[in-house]
Image: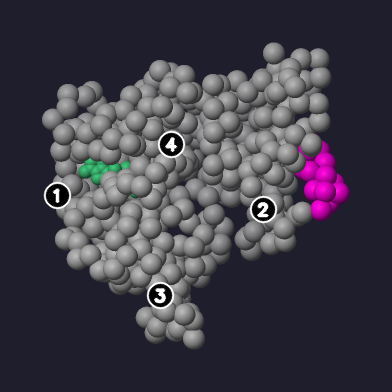
Amino acid sequence: MAGSPVNGAGGPQGRAAGRIRRETMSSETASDTEPAYTSLYFPQQSPVSINYLAKRHNVTVPAIDQPFSYLDLGCGNGVTLNTMAASRPDCSFTGVDMMPDHISNAREDAARGELTNVEYLELDFQGFLQHDDPQFDYITLHGVYSWVSADERRNVRDIIAKSLKPNGLVYVSYNTLPGAAVLAPLRDILKNYTDTLSGSLIERTREGLKYLKFLKDNDALYIRNNTLVGAAIDAMFQQDIRYVAHEYLADTHTALGISDVADEMAEISLKFCCGARLGSVHAQRAHLRKFQGILDSRPDDVAREAVKSVILNEKFRADIYARTDSMPGDTTSNSDFSGAVFGAAHLKTWQPRTPARELTSDILKIFEAAAPGELELFDLCAIDELQSRSPETLSDLVHHLVTDEHLRPFTAPSAPATNGENGKYRIAHAYNRASLADRLVQTGRCFLASEVLGDGIAVDMISGLFLTAITKDEVEDPVTFVDEALKATGREWRRKGVAITGPAERTALLTREYENFRLDTLPLMMRLGVVVID
Ligand SMILES: C[S@@+](CC[C@H](N)C(=O)[O-])C[C@H]1O[C@@H](n2cnc3c(N)ncnc32)[C@H](O)[C@@H]1O
């Protein structure tokens, strides 16, 4: 039997229930207030992705190639907003959050990146309602709507009703049913336990994790009989402790079914448009196919999505809503992408991941056509082998590649990828230089702003360090530079679960990584305008 959980953070304290207390991360043990949230970029919040999905669902969308305005409610540390602002300098971005640390972190991040098209307001939703602001084309909330009280949700809807432009779009994510239902007791168990401890919120969260581990290791049946609960506990040990504290110890949290949210949005004349996830849908696609008959028989999109939530046991959803006056109909239309341009998001060959074999060769052809540059649907019609396909089918095939994250919508022409030997490589945007210098090592990867995508693109630690190496005058050998930089992070470098420690092995692997970087990543980053040659 595992050892019993420790009350190491202090004895029972009998705190009254209230909001989790405020705390700055820099002094995790010293103060006793709420820690700042994690600093991550959420690509599903990007207007490019929102527009792309809404348009596939036959919704009139704001013109993505024209200046637009964007409001993020509960913007946290502003990383998503700042990255978007860097990739769309012609547009204006506003972030609202009531937590002073978040707003000051977001402003500092924007200042480091020399951004002039983003503003942050330290206000709660009620306060923002009184604020005199213009209307917005996009209003988003990520990780907010099911973490606030019903009154705050009402305030959010009042803001949307007041501040969304005609044809504007809303992105909202929330903990959902049925998946999150089984996690509700887990929150209560953790909160009831940690409320009896003293110490900072982070200390109490750490102690709470030990407590959960004890329950799990000793086969508490609630955990053993609910695999999602066991998986959630295992995941907590991998997650940023600030995320765990915010996610599991907040006083107000709920899980909302898609129909509940759709009903609430209908009160302000918003209509469900579609789910907002782009990535990682291939596994789901195959599973959902078995239920196609049931899904087709549902009366509308919300009912269909509610069944999908059951089939996939969803615990978190992200959805797009549109004003009812921007909805021409309920049917999915995917043919109106004339003029839309798509380009390769990475250069690895597309691998079929679904059993849709009859489409495999067509998809490969589309991928090959897109890999060296970008393409319009119109270009595809000109490819001999694809001429028998209708525009709808071609649009579906492109969508397949988009959801597998091989193709991305482009909002500006891409740049040529040329050899930098006669010039010097440079990271074009101050925001990206700051992200590579600060965030890459903190979070193990970061998103870089691309004006070609009008959006961010993910860069892993090694690619990010190579980007830094090739743009620094003093670096003679990028492989040695990256090796030293990796060691300086203090993190283990692992491949397939095994730590890479031997110097010769490290050098050989990094040399291979550098070759891949020069062949794949660097040309892509140049085409996306992230790297330029002076
Ligand atoms: C879980 S965090 C999500 C932050 C950010 N959207 C992200 O995904 O990184 C929730 C955010 O909502 C903010 N928030 C919660 N209630 C709020 C309210 N009533 N008014 C303004 N901000 C609020 C919190 O301060 C916090 O930054």
- Whichever of callouts 1 and 2 sits on the residue coming sooner in the sequence is 1
Choose top left, top right, bottom left or bottom right for residue 109: top left
Which residue bears the numbered disc 2? Answer: 492
Is residue 505 part of the magenta span, yes or no?
Answer: yes
Q: Which mark is residue 160?
A: none
**Mark pair 1, 3: CA separation:** 37 Å
- Judging from the image, the colouring scheme is one colour
- The foreground one among 133 and 203 is 203
**Image position of 534 with respect to 173: above or below:** above
Towards the viewer: 347 or 38: 38
- Label 1 is placed on what type of residue? Asp
Q: Are marks 3 and 4 in contact (CB under 8 Å)?
A: no
Which dot, 1 or 2, sits closer to the camera? 2
Horizontally, residue 323 falls left or right of residue 342, namely left
- Residue at the spot x=16%, y=42% of the render? 155
How far from the left and from the top, in percent, is residue 455? Answer: 50, 32
Secondary structure of residue under mark 3:
loop
Residue at image mark 4 = 80
Disc 3 residue lies near ligand 1 with CB under 8 A: no
Q: Decide if ligand 1 comes within 8 Å of the CB at mark 4.
A: yes
Instruction: Compare marks 4 and 2 and give the one earlier in the sequence.
Output: 4
- State whether residue 259 appears in this view: no
Instruction: Name the residue carrying label 1.
Output: 151
| Front in this rendered view, residue 203 or 306 | 203
Quadrant for residue 228, please give it.
bottom left
Residue neighbourhood size for the residue with mark 1, other residues' Cα within 10 Å, grouped as few (<14), some (14–19), many (≥20): few
Real-space CA distance between mark 1 and mark 4, rounded to the nearest whole angstrom: 26 Å
Residues at marks 3 and 2, CA–CA distance in whole angstroms: 29 Å
